[in-house]
Amino acid sequence: MTDLPKTLRNWRREHFFLFIYVHVALADNEMMYHEWDILKEKMSKISPKDEFSVLFVDVTKLYQRLTAEEIMEVIIFYKDNFQPTNEDIDGIVKNVQDIALADETVRQEELDIALNIRQILST
């Protein structure tokens, strides 16, 4: 993904976190209401509540157009751009796990994403 759209270049940290959270929530191709609630709760800690809808629309419009490989490219691009601290990484991984467990059915895709996220963000 060498030619990032202008909107992607204008993303903030909140977009990056939400993109990861949407990725795990949609790992099974559907977002359950429990996942939605946890996602909103996690985002409310780093972004004003009135911004959530706008962020969500921005992130999901892009997310739905990407292949699995492109999704990982976006995460890697922003990881390098934001350089998350160990504390950020621990928080993101904890939130990813909480979202994966929200519907009380953990699928292999969700586990794979949780493991990959820590590895990608730590390198």
Image (cartoon, rainbow, N blue to C red):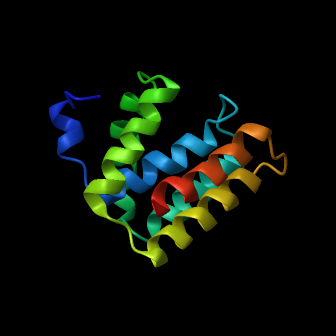
The answer to whether residue 11 is left or right of residue 20 is: left
Q: Position of residue 88 (x, y in %)?
A: 45, 72
Specify the quadrant that holds the N terminus: top left
Determine the residue positioned at 84% across, 51% down. 104
Q: Position of residue 70 (x, y in %)?
A: 42, 29
The answer to whether residue 35 is left or right of residue 123 is: right
- Is 117 or 51 nearer to us in this picture? 117
Determine the residue positioned at 21% across, 32% down. 4
From what the image shows, is residue 67 above or below residue 35?
A: above
Determine the residue positioned at 37% across, 52% down. 16
Q: Position of residue 61 (x, y in %)?
A: 38, 29
Residue positioned most to the front: 123
Determine the residue positioned at 26% across, 56% down. 81
The answer to whether residue 15 is left or right of residue 94 is: left
The answer to whether residue 42 is left or right of residue 97 is: left
Residue positioned most to the bottom: 87
Specify the quadrant that holds the C terminus: bottom left
- Is 76 or 13 nearer to us in this picture? 76
Q: Position of residue 44 (x, y in %)?
A: 45, 66
- Is 44 or 7 nearer to us in this picture? 7
How many numbered circles does the render carry?
0
From what the image shows, is residue 75 above or below residue 98?
A: above
